[in-house]
Image (cartoon, rainbow, N blue to C red):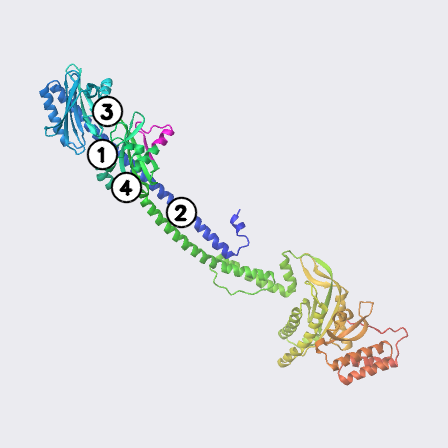
Amino acid sequence: MDFLGLFFKGWPLKYQLMFRLILLNTVIGTVLTSISFSMQYYEGKSSRFMMMNLISNNINDLLLDLLAEIEGEAEGYKDLLNKASINNPEARNQARIFITNHLKSNKYMNGFSIIDSKTGYMFRTMKNQEDKLLVAETISEGNRVFRSTLYENRGTPEQKIILTDSNENDPRHFDFYLEFKANKKKGWFNSRGYSQNVLHGYPPILSYIVPLEDDSGALVGMLTLDFGVLQLQKYLMDITNKKMDRDYSFGGIPFVLERRNNKEIVVIGHPDPIYIETLPDPTIVSDSNKFLILAEKHPDPRIRGFTKIIEKEYKEKRDPFNQNSKGINIGKSDDNSLWLYSWTATYPGAKPDWIICVCVNRELAAASVISSLRITLWVLGLLLIVTGLVSIKNSRIMSKPLERMAKDVIEIGEGRIVFSSDSTILVKEMIDLKDGIEKMKSGLLSFRKYIPYKVVNQVLASRKTAEPFAEKKELTIFFSDLENFTTISESLEPDKLVKLIGDHLAMCTNIIQSLDGTVDKYIGDSVMAFWNAPEDCENHELKACQAALACQEQMVLFNERNKAEGLPLLKMRIGISTGTVFVGNIGSEDRLNYTAVGDTVNLASRLEGTNKTYKTWILISDKTAAGIRGQILTRPVDKVAVKGKANAILIHEVLALGQDETPELRQIIDLTVLGFEHYLAQRFQQAIDCYTQILDINKGDHLTLFYIERCKGFLVFPPPSDWDGVHISNSK
């Protein structure tokens, strides 16, 4: 079902075409825009996600490679110490000198330590915040006292601190040592400091611990290689400066989170020193180490935004720190900026729980895609405008000839047939349609010459097939005939005869139709017409008489032309009657004739012939005369019983329009009326006297001459006693 057709029902074609084409182009443009937008968006989104995965995986792999390198070095130093024997001070000193020199050349290694399980001796080398190498040595003094000394890298004592609490300063009581001893496995351990007093305020470290054994395999100590927060920070800074800004940009950063005690999530790696060096007190963890910052209270809004993603993971019963856990999420930071996060959970060893995360600005990352989409939208918008203008132009080109043809069809339906001269039609189907309409016009014009045009118009307007029918209606009937035309026609050549008749009939037809009459048929040189059908016509008696007078007036001009062309002069007789008739489609199913039948029709025909008797030119019935009284000048002619009718009627002669009355004409009418009254009263001499006075005014008045002769005859041969003045007419 055409729902658009229902919506546009009744709209002009050009607007329908215009809006349909614009709507079609809009839909197509919208679909193409949506497809293009979606393809670019999802392609851009996919590329961003791939990029983020690549960044986080690359950073994770690089970090794991670095930690694996530290693990390998620890295994090598373990072999060296086992061979040198940790209990041999000289060998132990040579080993620590070797490892210390190596530490200086490795910028990502934070330090190392050696712990003697038997004596509690600890030697530790580490880097401070200024990347200076510091050396700490803890030696047992008696059963309860441990002395720790902090040196600069040149070996000169810088600070000596004597500690008396053996439980806090004996390295064998440190958490990482106890955890390692209990598990008896090598691996990575979290170390918050070997001595809170000695290392207070220094960043936490991640230590890879390997056991030191004697020849029998018994544990004699442990070796640690450390990867600290400051080293992780340097590593992330290098990645950011050398890799992210070069390859990925978009204002992003990598950072590392660590879960402690399955509860606290702290930031242990961040590339920007501003978030490490100076921190407000509420952001630090409970151990008063300013380097371990709670993620949810971190001054970087990007990290606080990521904590919301972690919280969501927990709410959905997922552990974001679970091994090989990965994700890509869009999150909003506290400053309402949108960031794209890609994160990977990694286990460098047995511990700790780490998440390596990379975030980039979503808007910046999508800027290229948005720019491309914006260009696409502009192009498609411009395309829609152009197609809209083209649609309007095309709709006008298409609709203009159709509007002309629609107008033609409407005019045909209304009976107005005008041939079009439009030759700008370019579409074949429209050309065929136009040709069909023109052929229909020609056919209807021809059809209208055979059938009264009013009837044709009525049939067209009814939108029904013509069928036999008749209605009873009062009409005024008009009959005309040319005097002695049969004799005239015998003297003319066929072409001249056809032209002469054609011109005469055309003249009569034009006059009749101009006065709302319907030409029924032509019978040789005769015309039959009627008024008040098929359309109602007021004053139909008057219009019929006006048509008769106009025809007689035009006959004068017609004869003047004929005389100039050497053609015979013509005289026309007219009979008019008014009465009830049957009018409609008379005939068979295959052939119909819209006509009128009845006594009124016959009477009009007889009146036309009766003109011969009285030497008149227009005779009308008494009922017609009653309908025109005061508007048309008439005079009584006779009481006659025409052929085929038993009852006599009074007939009248039409003289002129009421507006054309003159004193002479009025005198003739009055004398005729008086003379006719004397005639009916058998006062024939008085009648002659009246008629004679008419001859004084108009010597050639044929009706007057006729009645003078008739009255003279009755004076010689009086009528019978039962005479009622009725004349029996034998005219056809």
Mark whose residue sits in front, 1 or 2: 1
SS for dot 4: loop
State the residue position of label 4: 251
Between the residue at mark 3 and the residue at mark 4, the CA separation in whole angstroms equals 33 Å
Q: Position of residue 671 (x, y in %)?
A: 80, 80
Q: Is residue 694 above or below residue 454?
A: below
Give the residue at mark 2: 32
Looking at the image, residue 673 sits to the left or right of residue 539; the answer is right
Question: Label 1 belongs to which residue?
Answer: 233
For the residue marked with disc 3, what is the amino acid?
Answer: Phe
Q: Amino acid at mark 4?
A: Gly
Amino acid type, callout 1: Gln
View extreme (bottom): residue: 696
Q: Nearer the viewer, residue 436 or 383?
A: 383
Q: Earlier in the sequence, mark 1 or mark 2?
A: 2
Left or right: where does residue 104 sit relative to residue 477?
left
Label 1 residue SS: helix
User: Which residue sits furthest right?
Assistant: 721
The amino acid type found where label 2 is placed reads Leu
Q: Which residue is mark 3?
A: 189
Q: Earlier in the sequence, mark 3 or mark 1?
A: 3
